[in-house]
Image: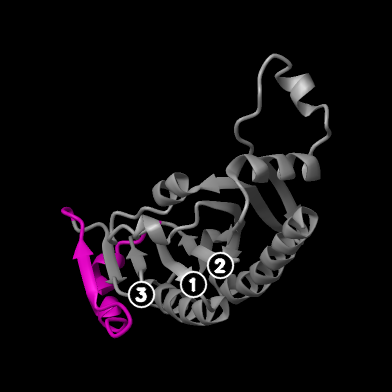
Amino acid sequence: MIVKRLICEIRFKLTLLYYDIRARFAQGFREDYPDYTYSTDGSVLKLFNKESRKKIILQAWRASIVHFNEATPPSFFKSTQNVLKAYCDQLKVKALGRIGVRFQYLEQKQISFDGLRETIKRSFYKDTMDEIIAPDGKTTDIACHMFFEERGYKHNLVFGPVSRDEISQRFWDEDFEAEDRKQLPQVALLVDIDCYRHDVSSESITNIFKFSQGIAQRLVDNITGRLT
């Protein structure tokens, strides 16, 4: 299973200091993110590494970092922590309205889409689901969706089967060239985990990185373990 897309985002009260420090701040990360664009009104600055398919998005009220096909999440978190802490320091941001980490895993499957859908149904739903919900129809797709809280963190979890077309559409990004569809799996299991917290100190960045990695891996293991 690979981390197809890994996102970290912080949100905070809008600050005009953004317009003073953005260029100087961005310059310090040009080695890893050599390309950049400004929005027409200058309110959004994006830094890219198009070869590695990763980017930083900076605004006066938020910052996010996005990596595709991330092979080493711990390395991502180490570099991301450095970027976000430096950004908060330069903007003099002490309080975050929201901080979140989102993992989007893909695991290629050697069975048909219908076969994976039925496996998920058998593993996570009662046999009578179709009879109760749609007695005159046939299930053509399925997605398991749940919200839960653990140790003060909120989680939004979605998992289910995805086809090659859906993978291509779901992971398309306007800032990068489209991936070769032939290199994408025909059928895969998608596990999408968003771990977040509201109204925290900017010093909590390290804490959510440590916690989210553990909870994400545990959820993935629990889900895939029932499908074997």
Q: Residue at x 66, y 23 (%)?
A: 138
**Above or below: residue 214 compared with residue 151:** below
**Above or below: residue 137 compared with residue 219:** above
Indicate the quadrant where residue 199 lies: bottom right
Q: Amino acid at mark 1?
A: Glu
Q: Give the alpha-carbon distance from disc 3 to disc 2, as whole Å.
A: 15 Å
Q: Residues within 10 Å of mark 3 (few under 14, many from 20)?
A: some
Q: Is residue 113 left or right of residue 17?
A: right
Q: Which residues are magenta?
A: 14-41
Residue 206 location (% of width, % of height):
60, 76
Residue 103 location (% of width, % of height):
56, 61
Q: Amino acid at mark 3?
A: Ser
Q: Amino acid at mark 2?
A: Ile
Secondary structure at badge 2 equals strand
Q: Give the alpha-carbon distance from disc 1 to disc 2, as whole Å.
A: 7 Å
Q: Residue at x 45, y 74 (%)?
A: 84
Label placed on residue 2: 2
Do tag 1 and tag 2 residues touch (Cβ < 8 Å)?
yes
Outermost residue toward the left? 40
Indicate the quadrant where residue 192 lies: bottom right
Outermost residue toward the front? 111
Q: Residue at x 30, y 74 (%)?
A: 51
Please state, as top left, top right, bottom left or bottom right, where the C terminus lies in the image.
bottom right
